[in-house]
Image (cartoon, helix red, strand yellow):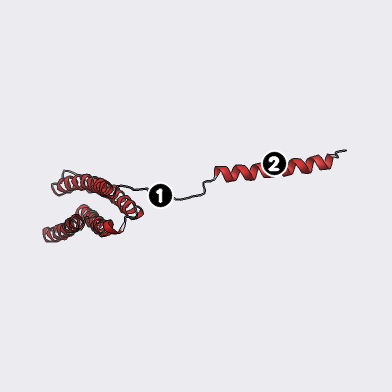
Amino acid sequence: MATRKGIVVTAIILVAISAASFVIWIVPQNRGSSFVVSDYKSELESVRERQTLIATEMESGLKELLDKTLPPDDFVTRAQTSSAQVTSLITELIESNPPVEWRESYLNYDESLKKYNEYLTESISLAKKMKGGISLVDLNEEISKIDSLKKESNSLVRKSNETRP
């Protein structure tokens, strides 16, 4: 007949098997998310449109900062948020793994986004300098540097458009 010890051992084994099965079922096997892209043109257009929205917002914010209608701290917050959004767009482009015919266009747009992030970083630096006080000469130099980064980013966007299949 069944002994008490045998019943306890059997119960422990059943609980262990059930717990292990539950853990395997509940814990996802693939820890990272992945993007499945089938229309690479639409994907690139989507990223471009979102980046354009970010750029429009930041241009408005920079104008307000220079007109002194937006406090530097508020501008920094906006720019940091925009930088995080641009970083997400970069990740999205990289993870989309485009086919060979789209790769050059995607790489150029990726470089454009990286250059735009540099633009945002310089804009943040400008806002912090404005908060602490900046001479007119230094202000003009910073604005010139920011404009240069923006032009480089736009140039890479054009290059991306030219290299589309």
Residue that mark 2 sits on: 15
User: Hey, what amino acid is under mark 1?
Assistant: Ser
Residue 164 in which image quadrant: bottom left
Q: Classify 51 as above or below 156.
A: above
Indicate which disc residue 34 carries.
1
Which of these two is toward me, 14 or 77?
14
CA gap between label 1 and label 2 equals 35 Å
Residue 28 screen position, x and y as percent: 51, 46
Answer with left or right where residue 22 lies relative to residue 151.
right
Q: Earlier in the sequence, mark 1 or mark 2?
A: 2
The quadrant in which the N terminus is found is top right
SS for callout 2: helix
Which of these two is toward me, 92 or 141?
92
Residue 126 screen position, x and y as percent: 20, 55
Which of these two is toward me, 138 or 143?
143
SS for callout 1: loop
Give the label, 1 or 2, closer to the camera. Answer: 1
Indicate which disc residue 44 carries.
none
Density class for disc 1 (Cα within 10 Å; few <14, some 14-19, many ≥20) is: few
Residue 107 screen position, x and y as percent: 27, 59
Residue 87 screen position, x and y as percent: 31, 53
User: Hey, what amino acid is under mark 2?
Assistant: Val
The quadrant in which the C terminus is found is bottom left
